[in-house]
Amino acid sequence: MIRIVIVGAAGRMGRHLITNIMKSSDLKLAGAVEYAASPFLGQDAGVVAGMGESGVKITADLKEAVKNADSIIDFSTGNVIENATVAAAAGLSIVVGTTGLKPEEKDALAKLAANGARILLAPNMSVGVNLLFHLAKQVTEILGTDYDVEIVEMHHNQKKDAPSGTAVRLAEIIAKARDLSYEKDVMHGREGLVGARKKNEIGMHAVRGGDVVGDHTVIFAINGERVELTHKASSRDTFANGALRASRFLATAKPGIYDMQDVLGLK
Ligand code: NAD
């Protein structure tokens, strides 16, 4: 049984994580943490997640919450480094789902891992998306440089950034496999007299609408045929399940900093 503390417990991802832990047979909710002024402090984490009583009250005291636990899963918008430091000091592994970390924050996590912490960091925990990353690299290598590559992503109408981090990662992987540069060779959308498509262009298109959780398609086209790789996320459960799989992976991992490619054995 892996005993897990969720940081960011009342958030969208936190609730999905708590729900999936309460449904599982090998994981136990050991703690639930929110920020100091959260209106959810003192409430039962299972009730907040819509699952009924869990016996775990939401607290702002992470140090107290980790006392009877094995692993932290952090999908908060709080201070990831502080949380990882608490995890390392208490001998717990930590799965970091929070996105938008600065380079110095990633360095700080690597330093903690070098000193014995077990950390997994992945901006997209979906197992399918991580498989898509792997397949995009493989297909690019197999098809070679003659195919036109275009990436199309679609997300809900509230998404603030474009293209999505996942689409950017796909373009980086393809650019690396074809010896191209993300900055120079990615063409964001097309408008007006842009001329014929350049051979080495990677087209990037962001579509927005409705409540789409996240769709990504990579198109490889040449005269006579095209290959399309598509992943569609229909629920945040895909990220939650990936994070729980990551937590199980860390339970037996050596100290170090890992990503989802390690969890899936794709390295
Ligand atoms: P959200 O805003 O719904 O939830 C964030 C929660 O963190 C909130 O409940 C907030 O009160 C809490 N929080 C803020 N400061 C805190 C602190 N100091 N201590 C404890 N809790 C604190 O956001 P969300 O949609 O659940 O996403 C959370 C993060 O996860 C974002 O960075 C998002 O980009 C990322 N995310 C990652 C993946 C992935 O697969 N890695 C998937 C979805 C979202």
Image: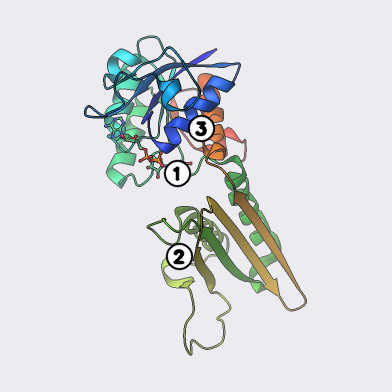
* Cα–Cα span, label 3 and label 1: 11 Å
Q: Position of residue 212 (x, y in %)?
A: 54, 54
Q: Is residue 267 visible?
A: no
Q: Position of residue 113 (x, y in %)?
A: 38, 28
Amino acid at the residue labelled 1? Pro
Amino acid at the residue labelled 2? Tyr
N-terminal-most mark, 3 or 2? 2
Judged from the image, the secondary structure of the residue bearing numbered disc 3 is helix
Considering only vertical position in the picture, is 100 above or below 77? below
Q: Quadrant of residue 127?
A: top right
Mark 1 Cα within 10 Å, few/some/many (few <14, many 20+)?
some
Q: Which residue is mark 2?
A: 182
Ligand 1 has an atom within 8 Å of the beta carbon of the residue at disc 1: yes
Which quarter holds ligand 1? top left
Question: Which quadrant is home to the N terminus?
Answer: top right
Judged from the image, the secondary structure of the residue bearing numbered disc 2 is helix
Amino acid at the residue labelled 3? Ala
Q: Residue furthest top?
A: 68
Label placed on residue 123: 1
The residue sitting at 61% across, 16% down in the picture is 25
Considering only vertical position in the picture, is 180 above or below 224? above
N-terminal-most mark, 1 or 2? 1
* Cα–Cα span, label 1 and label 2: 18 Å
Mark 2 Cα within 10 Å, few/some/many (few <14, many 20+)?
some
Along the line of sight, the residue nearer the viewer: 223 or 143:
223
The residue sitting at 55% across, 35% down in the picture is 242
Along the line of sight, the residue nearer the viewer: 107 or 97:
97
Judged from the image, the secondary structure of the residue bearing numbered disc 1 is loop
Q: Which residue is mark 3?
A: 243
Question: Which quadrant is home to the C terminus?
Answer: top right
The residue sitting at 49% across, 37% down in the picture is 259
